[in-house]
């Protein structure tokens, strides 16, 4: 759905159910626009004697009835928010009614019949942005906050909504604006051959901006992972107990467990939250030589999942592993695990079948090994703690993490322009050409917060919101 940005866009009074669809104890119907209060009193009869448009107080809830003519539809609480002190920055009303779907639909119908119109997806937050209540990155964080399913995703969304990322971008952009204005001034006096911008300081700024933008751009990999769930690949030989381990971690029978080798032929995924972090576990096909075409396709996908994973759990039968095997496994996956953001953990499974301490126990203890019985679900909590520990060791609690692909693209483009500026100065490119790259960098940074944008971009962003937000 594409939102319209005509001149009359903000003049309409819009309405929508702001709570989740379906029946519940209560529902909230939201109205926003200059006619909100007028429209409320066409439908609302307050229990408080003498309450009207002139004496109603902002941010106060009033008990009363919604009437369809003489017929009482429901008893409700109505709250008026006087502009600009509302979510949208406009006069707004919120009506808390009972959660009957009939009541919700009828109330919306009455509002529309009396001059309102149904809001489009994201239109309330769109108005908040257009009215300066939040910038574009903060508006996008609202959608992330609603969709957050883990403590970490919630914290990232809250940080962005409160302006942490916006402030950083604004600071970077402002530093560049100051020098850009001096460069533009030089172009106005090009015939006089004067320099207003200190080239040494400007190059220091460019180097600083390059470092900051590179750091923000590189944070996207981790930010996106934390937002969508940290991918954990469960790999190993057939019958090592990978599917049993997945079931133990999820605490449900998600994967089919069988003694027949090669049962798992495709990657099976599910997500759980541990201590506020979302982990996306991927049970993969057992790694072995096989003549089965379908099984081999599953094994190929296993290697793809290893590339994508941040954490790799190599599950082995504790009675069927030795030092040589461990070393061959590490060598086999060297190209996949030779990544500072990727961790390899050995999971020694089937401890319930262990009758004596293996001779290779020392070698296993020297590397990161968790001893479990997936079948009996023993020591699974130690494995969960280890996974969380690895995430916490990233030490990003106070770091700004980029988790939005639009922001990542804008940062990449801005960094590209900064690199062009740096190259231009080194090669003594004419100032007017360097000024073009400076404008491009400012444009890309401004597009993140909405200082510069297009109707098409805005329509695309807000159309992904739920109706009522």
Image (cartoon, rainbow, N blue to C red):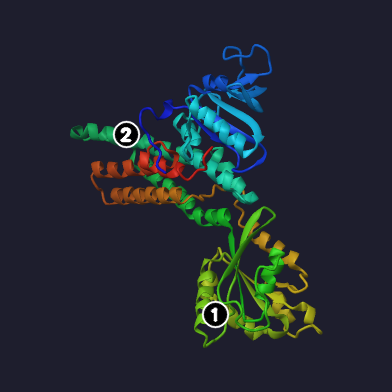
Residue 398 seen in render: no
* Whole-percent x, y for residue 71 in the image: 62, 24
Do the residues bearing badges 2 and 1 touch, measured as CB atoms within 8 Å?
no
Q: Which residue is mark 1?
A: 332
Counting residues from the start of the chain, the first of labels 2 and 1 encountered is 2
Residue 23 seen in render: yes
Seen from this angle, which residue lies furthest front?
70
* Whole-percent x, y for residue 321 in the image: 68, 83
**Splitting the image into 4 quarters, where does residue 59 fall?**
top right
Image point 64% across, 61% down: which residue? 390
Q: Is residue 184 left or right of residue 36?
A: left
* Whole-percent x, y for residue 229 in the image: 59, 58
Rounded to the nearest angstrom, the CA distance separating label 2 from label 1 is 57 Å
Seen from this angle, which residue lies furthest left?
191
Image point 68% across, 18% down: which residue? 47
**Splitting the image into 4 quarters, where does residue 460 fall?**
top left
Q: Is residue 139 left or right of residue 158?
A: left
Q: Nearer the viewer, residue 362 or 47?
A: 47
Q: Quadrant of the N terminus?
A: top left
Q: Which residue is mark 2?
A: 182
Image point 52% across, 28% down: which residue? 111
């Amino acid at each position: 759905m594409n939102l319209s940005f005509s001149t009359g866009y903000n003049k309409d009074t819009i309405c929508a159910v702001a709570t989740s669809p379906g029946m519940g104890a209560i529902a909230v119907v939201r109205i926003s626009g200059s006619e909100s209060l007028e429209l409320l009193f066409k439908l609302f009869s307050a229990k408080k004697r003498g309450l009207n448009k002139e004496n109603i107080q902002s941010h106060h809830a009033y008990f009363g009835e919604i009437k369809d003519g003489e017929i009482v539809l429901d008893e409700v609480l109505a709250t008026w928010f006087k502009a600009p002190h509302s979510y949208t920055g406009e006069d707004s009303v919120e009506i808390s009614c009972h959660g009957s779907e009939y009541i919700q639909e009828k109330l919306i119908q009455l509002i529309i019949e009396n001059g309102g119109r149904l809001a489009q997806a994201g239109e309330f937050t769109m108005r908040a942005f257009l009215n300066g209540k939040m910038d574009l990155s903060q508006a996008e964080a609202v959608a992330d906050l609603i969709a957050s399913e883990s403590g970490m995703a919630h914290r990232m969304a809250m940080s962005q909504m409160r302006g942490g990322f916006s402030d950083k971008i604004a600071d970077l952009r402002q530093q560049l604006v100051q020098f850009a204005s001096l460069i533009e001034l030089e172009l106005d006096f090009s015939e006089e051959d004067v320099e207003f911008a200190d080239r040494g300081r400007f190059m220091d700024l460019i180097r600083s901006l390059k470092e900051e933008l590179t750091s923000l751009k590189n944070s996207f990999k981790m930010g996106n992972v934390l937002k969508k769930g940290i991918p954990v690949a469960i790999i190993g030989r057939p019958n090592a107990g990978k599917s049993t381990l997945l079931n133990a971690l999820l605490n449900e029978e998600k994967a089919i467990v069988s003694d027949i080798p090669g049962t798992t032929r495709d990657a099976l995924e599910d997500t759980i939250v541990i201590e506020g972090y979302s982990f996306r576990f991927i049970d993969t096909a057992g790694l072995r030589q096989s003549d089965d075409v379908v099984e081999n396709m599953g094994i190929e996908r296993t290697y793809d999942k290893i590339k994508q994973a941040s954490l790799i759990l190599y599950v082995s039968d504790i009675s069927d592993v030795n030092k040589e095997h461990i070393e061959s496994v590490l060598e086999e996956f060297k190209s996949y695990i030779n990544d500072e953001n990727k961790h390899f953990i050995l999971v020694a499974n089937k401890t319930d079948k262990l009758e004596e301490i293996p001779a290779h126990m020392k070698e296993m203890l020297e590397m990161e090994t968790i001893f479990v019985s997936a079948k009996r679900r023993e020591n699974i909590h130690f494995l969960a703690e280890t996974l969380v520990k690895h995430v916490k060791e990233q030490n990003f609690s106070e770091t700004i993490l980029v988790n939005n692909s639009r922001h990542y693209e804008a940062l990449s483009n801005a960094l590209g322009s900064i690199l062009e500026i740096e190259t231009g100065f080194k090669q003594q490119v004419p100032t007017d050409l360097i000024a073009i790259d400076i404008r491009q960098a400012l444009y890309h940074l401004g597009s993140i917060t909405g200082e510069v944008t297009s109707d098409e971009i805005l329509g695309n962003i807000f159309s992904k919101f739920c109706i009522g937000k």
